[in-house]
Structures are given as C-alpha cells and as structure tokens.
Amino acid sequence: MSKINLGIIGGGQLGSMLSVAAKKLNIKTTIFCDDINAPAQNFCDEFISGDYNDNKKILEFVKKVNVITYEFENIPYETLNEMNKLVSVLPKPSVNRLIQHRLAEKDFINKLNIRTTRYVSIEKKTDLDTLEDFLPGILKTTTMGYDGKGQYPIQKIEDIETMNVDFSKEYILEKLVKLKKEISVVLTRFGINNFQVYEPIENTHQNQILKHSKIPADVSKKISEQAKEWATRIAEELKYIGTLCVEFFIDRNENLYVNEIAPRVHNSGHLTINAYNISQFENHVRAVCSLEKVPLKKLSNAEMINLIGNQIEPYRQNLNLKENEFFFDYLKKEIKEKRKMGHITTLI
Ligand code: ADP
Ligand code: MG
C-alpha cells in the first residue's frame, strides 16, 4: 500500500508538531497555508501556499492527500466544505463552523447543560447600554479571536468610549469570572464512545496568552472528574474525530465553567509529547487516519513554559539543557512581541 498523505491546513507550530508525529507513523504530510513563510514547511513533506479561498490551490492540495485536517479553527467554512466533497475533512467541517463562532459555541455548550460564563450577544454599540449586570466583563469578537486578540476588558460602560472597538463586527459580552484557576482537558476521540483522555492540565496565562502549563493540575478529584466528563460529553455530542481541547475556568467558589473549545491540538497539550507514550499530536494523526488506538500511558509529571517574543533568544544562543528539559524552537523567521516562538517542557 502506498503511504497515506495527510493534508493539514495551517502552517504554524501545531502543523509542525502534527507533521513530526505523522512522520513517526510513516505518514506523509502536505501543508496548505496562506502564509508563505509558514514555519511548518520545515517539518512537512510538501508545502503549498495559497489563499484559503483560492480554488486552484485548494484543488492542487486536495488532489495530493488522502485525508484532511486543520491546525486552527479560523478557516472559511466554505473551503472546508468544498474540500470535504472530494476528500474527507476531519474533524467534520460542521464542527469547525460551530466552534469558530463564540456565540454558537456557547449556545451549544449550554444546551448540553454544561456551565459557561454568562454571556450576551452584542450586535451594535447601543446593545451595551443596558448590560451593567454583565460588568465587569470582556467584550470578545464572535469570530477570528485567538491569544486574547479581539478582546476588550470593560469595567464600566463608559470604558467603551476610549477603546477603538470596530462595531461593524459581532461581539459577545462575557461576565468576568473571578478566577481561581484555569485548566484544560485534551482528549482524542476515535469513534463512538471511543476515547483517550489526558489528565487535566493546569494553565497560567499572561496578558491572555498561555504562559505555563503543568500536570498534575492542583484541583480536587471532583473538579477533575467533572472536567473530563464534560469534555468527553462535548466531543461525543459533536461526533468528533481527532484531538480536541476544552478550556475551563474554576472560580473562587470552586465552580467549574467551560471557557472555550478548541477543535484541534492545543498549546496546553504540548507537554504530552514528553509526558506520555503517545502525544496529543500522534493521537490526532492516528484518529484522523483511522490507525489503531494504542493504550495511553503517562510517563511523568511535567511542566511547559511558552517562549513568547524575544524570550526565545537566550535559548537559541546558549542551549544548556538538563536531561529532563526539552526545548522546541518553532523556527519562525521573525520574532514578534506576543508571538509564540517556542516552548520548554520539563519532566518533574
Ligand atoms: P482566546 O480565544 O484568545 O484563547 P479566551 O476566551 O480563551 O480567548 O480568553 C483568553 C484568556 O483570557 C482566558 O484563558 C482567561 O485567562 C482570560 N479570560 C477570558 N474570558 C474571561 C472571563 N470571562 N473571565 C475571566 N477571565 C477570562
Ligand atoms: Mg482560549
């Protein structure tokens, strides 16, 4: 049999790590990305750059691959849908459409009787006038947000006047949760009630960007079980195939809330590369390529630190790693403030 060729849309670090995992499984990868400098081209077998609406490029990509997946959620639904007519896209395009829209995503989670933060749809500026009840809160664009982009913290209604919010876009206003902790659950669903669930990961953010993740998470058994049960239920309900991450808030009264779902491998799961026998990336490739599910074994506790912006520089210059430290350089051409450049995982 000829080698499987896995198509990946998106060429950032997640695409790179998926490619590395695929190679280990003797699977070829072809990456399609709208950024000609996408770092994942250093790791995949073939790279196609083109706009996500460019039909010619889409066809060129689709013709090469046996199955398609994606490393980020903000891909036009039409693109995924068109590709899916020719080669199967996993997770299904409808999952992506739901989750890339914050309002639809939160409505879906609430329908499952799973708690989210309180939220309300904002279609125009004056919608905010009567919403004191949701303050302090965060105004978030319904689409295209990541790493805190498109988010505006609001203490009082007047704050909005001094912010440069583009009200031609749709938003939701979310009540601020008094956070005690944030955790995430990464899991891989292979089919009906067929899962591998990684243990909950404790996450710390700086300026709304993930900075630090660790296992075990310092949470009660009850919270840990509840988070795993909710994440599993969400994936089952979506008939999801592949790796998914659910981000949670825990408030000061020990209430658990789903913050958001990532229909993809996730930054908080990077430590699974070194802390488990099978990483979130390998499991994703296994699930979308219909390979066998291997029993999951935790090898070690671990922590991960994201290297953001110029924090990567000392590591690039002087690599003095201890035996239990693993450094990942995403090989991004340009260092930018707030850009995730690499990470370090330490087994502990
Ligand atoms: P992104 O899509 O950019 O990851 P999130 O909605 O996950 O956006 O927000 C990023 C981070 O901002 C969260 O992990 C959390 O630290 C903080 N945050 C977002 N919404 C809230 C909220 N309603 N209450 C408290 N903190 C929040
Ligand atoms: Mg988030």
Image (cartoon, rainbow, N blue to C red):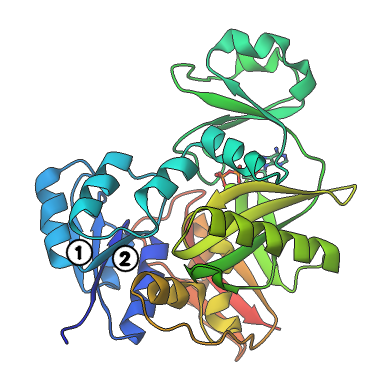
> Is residue 143 in sight in this rendering?
yes
Compared across the picture, whether 288 is left or right of 60 comes to right
Instruction: Determine the image quadrant of residue 43.
Output: bottom left
Q: Quadrant of the C terminus?
A: bottom right
Compared across the picture, whether 307 is left or right of 225 comes to left
> Is residue 266 in sight in this rendering?
no
Identity, as a three-letter code, of the amino acid under mark 2: Ala
SS at circle 1:
strand
Residue 113 screen position, x and y as percent: 70, 44
Residue 53 screen position, x and y as percent: 20, 40
Most distant residue in the right direction: 253
Mark 2 C-beta closer than 8 Å to ligand 1: no
Q: Are the residues flagged by discs 1 and 2 in contact, CB closer than 8 Å?
A: yes
Q: Which residue is mark 1?
A: 47
Q: Quadrant of the N terminus?
A: bottom left
Compared across the picture, whether 164 is left or right of 78 comes to right
Per the rendering, the mark at residue 40 is 2
Residue located 51% across and 78% down the image: 279
Residue 75 screen position, x and y as percent: 34, 45
Identity, as a three-letter code, of the amino acid under mark 1: Phe
Residue located 63% across and 16% down the image: 160
Residue located 75% across and 34% down the image: 176
Residue closer to the observer: 264 or 159: 264
Residue 261 screen position, x and y as percent: 56, 50
Most distant residue in the bottom direction: 323
SS at circle 2:
helix
- Dot 1 or dot 2: first in sequence order is 2
